[in-house]
C-alpha cells in the first residue's frame, strides 16, 4: 500500500514541477511581449515629443533635457543616443545600465551590449522643415527585470516545495524499506521465505536410490574436502545449483557453462570457489566458509547479475538457482548435491520464485541418520 502512495506522490511532485516550469516559461514569453509593446509605445511618444519641441522652437539644450527626462522616467527605455545633424551627439542611460561607450575620437557614442540581454537598438530619424535634424537610437531589454524576478521567485518556490515533498517521500520509503528488511531477517526461515524448501527425508531417500552420482565425481571429491575442513573449523559451506534455459537461435563460441562459471568467479571473488558442469544447461558452485543467509543473499544478487548481463541476454531466456548448505550437519557430498538439485527443481516449477533454498533442520537430519543406521 505504501509503495502505491509513494509512487502517486512522486508522480504528483513531478507533474507539479513540470507544470511550474511550463507556467514560468509561458509567463516570461507573455511578459516579454508586453515589454516590447510598451517600449514601442514609449519610443513613439519620444519621437512625437522631439517633433513637437522642434515645432515650438525649442533650443538644442531644451530638446536634450526633454529627451533625458523621458528616458529616466520611462518604464522600458534603458538608454538613448541622439545625434543632431551638424551638431555634437549626446547620450543618456538609466543609472546602473552602463551600456553606452564614447568613441575615442569624441565624435559620438555607441552601445555595448555584448554578453548583455538587450534587444537590438531601435532607430528613428526626426525630420522637420524638410531636413533631418535628429537621429535617435534607443535601447531596451527583452523583459522587465522586476517582472522576471517575480516569476523566478514564484517558480522557485513551487519547485522547492515539490522537491522537498519528493525528498520526504524518498526518506520515508528508505525508512520503511529498512524496517521491513530488518523485520524480514528476524522472522524464522519457515515463515519468512517462500523460497525455502523444508527437508523431506523420505523423498530424498528415494531420489538417492535412483540418481547415478558417477558424473559428479569431481564435485563429490571437492565437497568431501571442503566438508572436512568445515567440520574442523566449525564453519558452513554453501552449494549452488544453477540451471538456465537456452535461446535455441543463439550461437556462442564459448560454452555457456564456462561463461557463467567465469562470471561466478568474478562475482563471488573467492580464491576457494569452484564450479562444476552439470549437463549442458547447468553448473554447481561450491562456496566454502559461507553461511546460509549470506549465500542466499549472494545467490539472489548473482541471479540478477546474470539476467542483467548483456552478454547473456541473447543466449539465455531464464535462470534458476537452487541452494543448500552444511548447516552444522555431518552430511556427505551426495546428500548435499541432491538437496541443491531438489531446490533447483522446485525453482523451475514456479517462474515467480526462480531462487529456492533447501533449509535443513539439523534435528530432523539426525533422526534421519539414526533411522538410516538401523535400516
Image (spheres, rainbow, N blue to C red):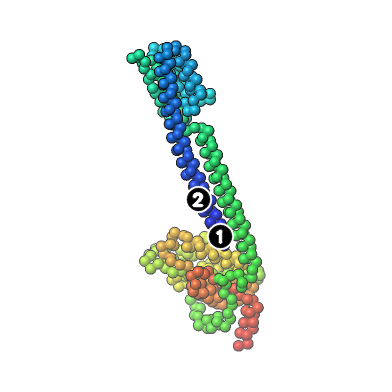
Looking at the image, which residue is at 64% across and 82% down? 367
Q: Residue furthest left?
A: 130
Q: What residue is rendered at 56% in x and 57% in y?
A: 6
Q: Please tell me in which quadrant of the rendered image residue 130 appears.
A: top left
Q: Position of residue 65 (x, y in %)?
A: 48, 16
In which quarter of the view is residue 5 placed?
Answer: bottom right
- Regarding mark 2 in the picture, which secondary structure is present there? helix
> Is 316 placed left or right of 95 in the picture?
left
Q: Nearer the viewer, mark 2 or mark 1?
A: 2
Q: Nearer the viewer, residue 100 or 30?
A: 30
**In screen coordinates, is 300 left or right of 129?**
right
Report the residue that reaches farthest toward the front.
56
Q: Residues within 10 Å of mark 1 (few under 14, many from 20)?
A: few
Residue under label 2, please give it. 15
The answer to whether residue 277 is seen in the rendering is: no
Q: Considering the image in quadrants, where does the N terminus appear? A: bottom right
Image vertical order of residue 129 relative to residue 230, above or below: above
**How many numbered circles does the render carry?**
2
- What residue did someone put label 1 on? 3
Amino acid at each position: 500500500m505504501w509503495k502505491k502512495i509513494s509512487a502517486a506522490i512522486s508522480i504528483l511532485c513531478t507533474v507539479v514541477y513540470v507544470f511550474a516550469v511550463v507556467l514560468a516559461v509561458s509567463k516570461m514569453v507573455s511578459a516579454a511581449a508586453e515589454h516590447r509593446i510598451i517600449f514601442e509605445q514609449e519610443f513613439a511618444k519620444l519621437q512625437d515629443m522631439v517633433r513637437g519641441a522642434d515645432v515650438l522652437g525649442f533650443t538644442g539644450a531644451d530638446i536634450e533635457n526633454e529627451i533625458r527626462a523621458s528616458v529616466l522616467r520611462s518604464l522600458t527605455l534603458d538608454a538613448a543616443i541622439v545625434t543632431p545633424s551638424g551638431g555634437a551627439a549626446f547620450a543618456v542611460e538609466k543609472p546602473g545600465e552602463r551600456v553606452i561607450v564614447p568613441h575615442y575620437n569624441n565624435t559620438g557614442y555607441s552601445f555595448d551590449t555584448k554578453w548583455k540581454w538587450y534587444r537590438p537598438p531601435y532607430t528613428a530619424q526626426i525630420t522637420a522643415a524638410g531636413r533631418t535634424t535628429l537621429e535617435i537610437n534607443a535601447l531596451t531589454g527583452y523583459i522587465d527585470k522586476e517582472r522576471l524576478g517575480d516569476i523566478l521567485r514564484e517558480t522557485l518556490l513551487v519547485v522547492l516545495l515539490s522537491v522537498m515533498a519528493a525528498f520526504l517521500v524518498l526518506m520515508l520509503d528508505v525508512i520503511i524499506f529498512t524496517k521491513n528488511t530488518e523485520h524480514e531477517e528476524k522472522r524464522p526461515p519457515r515463515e519468512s521465505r517462500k523460497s525455502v524448501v523444508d527437508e523431506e527425508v523420505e523423498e530424498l531417500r528415494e531420489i538417492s536410490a535412483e540418481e547415478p552420482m558417477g558424473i559428479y565425481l569431481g564435485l563429490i571429491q571437492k565437497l568431501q574436502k571442503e566438508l572436512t575442513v568445515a567440520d574442523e573449523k566449525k564453519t558452513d559451506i554453501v552449494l549452488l545449483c544453477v540451471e538456465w534455459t537456452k535461446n535455441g537461435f543463439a550461437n556462442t563460441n564459448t560454452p555457456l557453462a564456462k561463461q557463467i562459471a567465469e562470471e561466478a568467479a568474478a562475482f563471488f571473488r573467492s580464491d576457494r570457489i569452484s564450479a562444476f558442469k552439470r549437463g549442458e544447461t547447468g553448473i554447481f558452485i561450491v562456496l566454502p566458509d559461507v553461511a546460509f543467509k549470506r549465500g542466499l543473499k549472494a545467490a539472489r544478487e548473482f541471479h540478477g547479475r546474470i539476467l542483467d548481463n548483456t552478454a547473456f541476454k541473447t543466449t539465455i531466456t531464464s535462470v534458476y538457482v537452487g541452494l543448500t548448505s552444511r548447516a552444522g550437519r555431518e552430511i556427505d557430498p551426495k546428500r548435499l548435491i541432491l538437496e541443491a538439485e531438489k531446490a533447483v527443481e522446485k525453482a523451475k516449477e514456479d517462474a515467480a520464485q526462480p531462487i529456492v533454498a533447501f533449509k535443513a533442520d539439523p534435528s530432523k537430519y539426525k533422526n534421519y541418520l539414526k533411522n538410516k543406521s538401523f535400516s
